[in-house]
Image (spheres, rainbow, N blue to C red):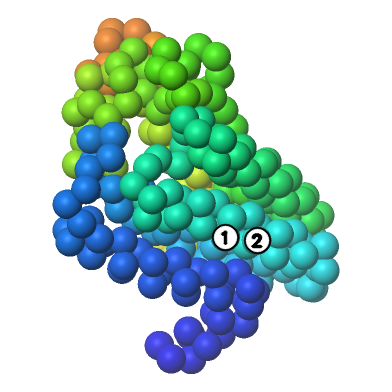
Amino acid sequence: MTTTLRRAAQWHRPMMLFVSAMAVLAVISAVGVFADSRVLTGVPIWLKPLKFSVSFVLYGTTLAWMLSLLPRRSRIAEWAATVVVAMSVVEMVVIVGQVLRGTTSHFNGTTPLNAALFQLMGAAIMVLFTAHLVIAIVVLRQPIADRAARYAVGLGLGLTLLGMLVAFPMVLPSQDPGIDGISGAHTVGVPDGGPGLPLVGWSTTGGDLRIGHFVGLHALQALPILAILLNRFLAARLDERTRVRLLVVGGSAYGVLTMLLTWQALRGQPLLRPDTLTLAALAALVVATAAATGMVLAARVGRPELARVA
C-alpha cells in the first residue's frame, strides 16, 4: 500500500498535492457539517465545500493517473494539468472563503465583492475547461498500448467536458430567479434551497441541473472502471476489439444519459418523479444500449469456442 501511494504521488506532483489538500478539506468540511449549525440555501453551510472537495479528490486523482498512462511525457499536458490545479485552487478558495463569511459563492451578486468573486469563479472554470480540453487532445494523440484503456480514457475525458457544458444553463437568463442580486439557479421551476435528496441536495420538487452535471463529470471514473471490469473478467472470453466496441457503446449510452438528465431538469421535473415522456426516453436508451451490446457480442471475432470448432 505504501509503495502504491508513493508511486501515485509521482504521477503529477502539483495535482497530487492538491488532491491531498482536498482530502484534508473534505474531513474539515465533514466536521463542519455537524459542528456548524449554520444553514445556507436549505442545507448545512459546509456541505458545498464537502461536495466540491470530494469531487476534486476524484477528479484530480483520475486525471493524474491518466497522465501516467502516456507512453512518453508531455510538457503541454503537464502544464495544462498545473493550470487545472491553479484554477481549482481559485474555485475552492472562493467557496471556502464565502462559507467563512456566511454567504453563498454561486450566483451571488448581492454586493460588488460577491459579484466579483462569482465572476472570478466563472473565469476560472472557463480556463479549467480549456486546460482539460488540451489534456484530452494530448492524450488522444499519444497511443496507449492497451486499446481498451485508450478508449476509456478518451471517452472519459470527452464526456467530462460534456458534464461541464451541461452546467451552463444554470447561468442563462431563463434561470434568473427574479431575486435582487442573484443571477442564476441550480433548480428549475422551484427556488433553490427547497426540499432535496439527502447529502447531494438535489431538488425533489423541481428540476435540478446539478444531476446531469454530476453524472457527466464522473464519466472520468466510470469509463475507466468499465474498461477495468471488461479486461479483468471478460478478457479470456472477448477479444480486444469486442471490448473496445463495448466501451464505445457504454460511453455513448453514458453521454445520452447525461443529456437526458439535463433535459429532464430543464423541464422542471424532479429526478425521482419522471413523467411518461422521460420514462419513454429512458426506456428507448436502455433498449438501444441492449441492442447495440447484443450486436457487438454477435459480431465478436477471435472467440475461443469458435476457434476450437474450426
Q: Which residue is mark 1?
A: 89
- The answer, for residue 39, to whether it is visible in the render is yes
User: Looking at the picture, which amino acid does disc 1 mark?
Assistant: Val
Residue 118 in the image: x percent, y percent? 55, 39
Residue 79 in the image: x percent, y percent? 77, 65
User: Looking at the picture, which amino acid does disc 2 mark?
Assistant: Ala
Residue closer to the observer: 180 or 267: 180
Residue at the location (67% across, 41% down)? 123
Residue at the location (17% across, 52% down)? 37
Instruction: Left or right? Give the position of 256 relative to 210.
Output: right
Instruction: Left or right? Give the position of 147 relative to 18.
Output: right
Q: Which residue is mark 2?
A: 86
User: Can you say which quadrant of the picture contains the N terminus?
Assistant: bottom left
Q: Residue furthest top?
A: 276
User: How would you rate the neighbour count of disc 1 (Cα within 10 Å): few for under 14, some for 14-19, many for 20 or more?
Assistant: some
Residue at the location (40% across, 17% down)? 179
Residue 225 in the image: x percent, y percent? 45, 57
Q: Secondary structure at mark 2?
A: helix
Q: Is residue 243 above or below residue 194?
A: below
Check contact, mark 1 vs mark 2: CB within 8 A: yes
Residue closer to the observer: 43 or 1: 43
Q: Is residue 191 above or below residue 75?
A: above
Residue closer to the observer: 234 or 184: 184
Tell me where residue 294 sits by quadrant.
Answer: top left
Q: Is residue 176 above or below residue 1?
A: above
